[in-house]
Amino acid sequence: MSLEAIRYKDGTLDILDQLLLPQKSEYINVSGVEDGWSVIKKMQVRGAPAIAVTGCLSLAVDLHKNTFQTKDDLYKFVAEKMKYLTTARPTAVNIVDAERKLTKLASELCSSTSIDVSQMHQRILEQIECMQADDIAVNKAIGDHGAKHIAENVAPKGLKVLTHCNAGALATAGYGTAVGVMRSLVKNGCLEHAFCTETRPYNQGSRLTAYELVQDKISASLICDSMAAMLMKTKDLSAIVVGADRVVANGDTANKIGTYQLAIVAKFHNVPFYIAAPSTTIDLTLETGEDIIIEERPHIEMTTMNGVSLAPEGIGCWNPAFDVTPAALITGGIITEFGVFTPAELRSKITEATAK
């Protein structure tokens, strides 16, 4: 997979402007945390894992450009910048997880009497700069676990799989979560055909997932969001695999708006419904989906497309970017880098796996 959403080397960060895809492939230079916050807020980079990696690498850019006189100064810089980055898009949890881990590391290094400020600076940079490769490895593990589970529990060959929004290489550091499962199914010779929704109002499916599937030469079809029920009724759909922006302790899952209704229809048609997400997307501090803050986006995303008005001026709009799928509707399982778990066993399995 040659598609790169994030390019980083030695303190230089460029991200593929996903607002321009598929018509143009242009990279934006991110010169520090302010730029990092901006490209995340504007959705020039999106997808919970990619948001975390981009945000942290934007901090790395600033760390390469700055020197610090004391460890306290460095700790304060890291803590404040990471806290600021978490405000760009509140629903995605990966950047919050990264903020906790980096702030904790900076605090521990600051308190250590065995290292100086220069060593502390280097350790923090090393921690950030391994995130990209680590994310790709995690995604490939998710893909392989998901493909194996679907082949063993749904069908070994001839699978037809639907995904919603974009949980691919463009939403991560590479390979993808939900689309990563499709890639692993292709690798194993199990996938007959992929389907992707357009994903209104931002069209991440038609602009981004379709782009990835075409780039990889995967047999695929694009459908409008409103065609999903008919697809399940008439096209012998094998499974649905979607990504996640936050999975909470009971298995309730926040993902792109439209996911909830897909899960309801899948339940009616007995189509297994899977979530594919890294452990960094699992937030055990929240008990249920009722606790998840749902981001609302500007009305213009609904009323215009590429600058062309789609609705009359003066019409009111409601534009939640995400919805929450109850755990009871996640019938296939939650695919992580540690394996595939039911919502009921998620808390214990993730706690056990991450404690090792």
Image: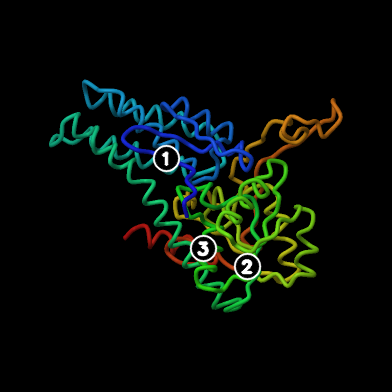
Label 3 sits on residue: 335
**Alpha-carbon distance for marks 1 and 2?**
37 Å
Crowd band around label 2 with a 10 angstrom C-alpha radius: few (<14), some (14–19), many (20+): some
**Alpha-carbon distance for marks 3 and 2?**
12 Å
Label 2 sits on residue: 331
Q: Front-most of 119 and 309? A: 309
Q: Helix, strand, or loop for circle 2? A: loop
Q: Residue 7, image x and y in percent?
A: 42, 40
Q: Quadrant of residue 354?
A: bottom left
Crowd band around label 3 with a 10 angstrom C-alpha radius: few (<14), some (14–19), many (20+): many
| Numbered disc in front, either 3 or 1 | 1
**Residue at point 65% right, 45% down?**
207
Q: Helix, strand, or loop for circle 1? A: strand
Q: Residue 290, image x and y in percent?
A: 62, 47
Q: Do the residues labelled 3 and 2 touch (CB within 8 Å)?
A: no
Q: Is residue 126 above or below residue 31?
A: below
